[in-house]
């Protein structure tokens, strides 16, 4: 209990009375480790991410948990709950795949139809959630909070499915998230979003390269097996 109380109250102090909650810093560090594990297609990325989600949930519900920063970002808080649920799905899916085939996930390109559905879900979900979040008292601009929520949902689901495009959805989330979090006073999270933006681009190209490498190997095997064995004897 003493450790939990210390964790809730711990701050990193700066000159001029500025500070960061240790929970916010740790939550984002866990998130970064989860992204690194996801880029390397490691199953442990999911439980590490869940730990970070639990910490950040207490940060973004400022009035509920009595934080010094009493700004509530309902989209940010809600997405932590969504992350946990989706991460459990991804954790189970990757673990089963690893037990069956030795690799947690094989990167795949989503079909054009799936890409269209993802775009419609992102824009439509943002439009639908914005008035709900506003009515609940979320921080303005509320559409940005809703965009981050929907983008995070789709990106996490895409990671679980193994779609290469999920990294680009994270980039779209980061672009909107940085100014929103900075204006709300969540400086650690805003800074981490800048870092995430660069990291997710790297992750996209890493998964792209893995997918292209597998395509080249499959094509080589197909060509080799298509040729007749030249050592077949004639009568």
Image: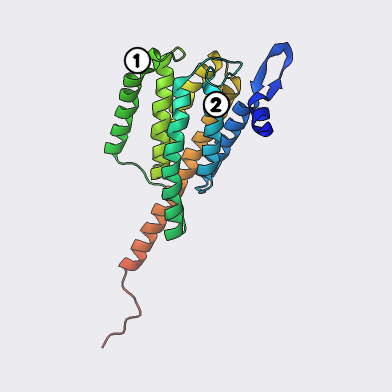
Does residue 2 lie above or below 66 as drawn? below
Q: Residues within 10 Å of mark 1 (few under 14, many from 20)?
A: some
Q: Which mark is residue 89?
A: none
Q: Nearer the viewer, residue 152 or 198?
A: 152
In this figure, which residue is indicated by the disc labeled 1? Answer: 131
Judge from the rendering whether residue 154 lies leftward or rightward of residue 204; answer left or right. left
Residue at the image point whose x is 58% and y is 31% from the top:
27
In this figure, which residue is indicated by the disc labeled 2? Answer: 58
- Indicate the position of residue 77 as horizontal and vertical percent values: 48, 25
Residue 208 seen anywhere in this rendered image of the structure:
no
- Indicate the position of residue 152 as horizontal and vertical percent values: 43, 30
- Indicate the position of residue 40 as horizontal and vertical percent values: 52, 47
Judge from the rendering whether residue 2 lies leftward or rightward of residue 142; answer left or right. right
Q: Nearer the viewer, residue 175 or 216?
A: 175
Residue at the image point whose x is 36% and y is 57% from the top:
219
Q: In the orientation shown, which residue stands out farthest toward the right?
A: 15
């Amino acid at each position: 209990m003493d450790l939990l109380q210390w964790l809730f109250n711990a701050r990193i102090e700066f000159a001029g009375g500025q500070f960061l909650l240790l929970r916010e810093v740790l939550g984002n560090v866990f998130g970064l480790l989860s992204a690194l594990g996801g880029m390397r297609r490691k199953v442990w990325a999911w439980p590490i991410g869940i730990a970070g989600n639990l910490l950040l949930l207490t940060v973004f519900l400022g009035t509920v948990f009595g934080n010094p920063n009493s700004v509530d970002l309902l989209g940010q808080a809600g997405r932590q709950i969504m992350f946990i649920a989706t991460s459990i799905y991804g954790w189970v899916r990757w673990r089963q795949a690893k037990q069956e085939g030795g690799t947690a996930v094989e990167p795949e390109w989503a079909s054009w139809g799936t890409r269209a559905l993802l775009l419609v879900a992102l824009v439509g979900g943002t439009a639908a959630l914005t008035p709900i979040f506003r009515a609940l008292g979320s921080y303005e601009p509320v559409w940005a909070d809703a965009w981050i929520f929907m983008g995070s949902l789709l990106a996490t689901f895409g990671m679980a499915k193994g779609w290469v495009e999920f990294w680009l959805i994270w980039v779209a989330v980061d672009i909107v998230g940085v100014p929103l979090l900075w204006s709300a006073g969540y400086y650690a999270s805003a800074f981490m979003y800048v870092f995430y933006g660069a990291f997710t681009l790297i992750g996209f190209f890493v998964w792209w390269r893995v997918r292209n490498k597998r395509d080249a190997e499959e094509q080589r095997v197909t060509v080799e097996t298509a040729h007749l064995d030249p050592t077949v004897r004639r009568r």
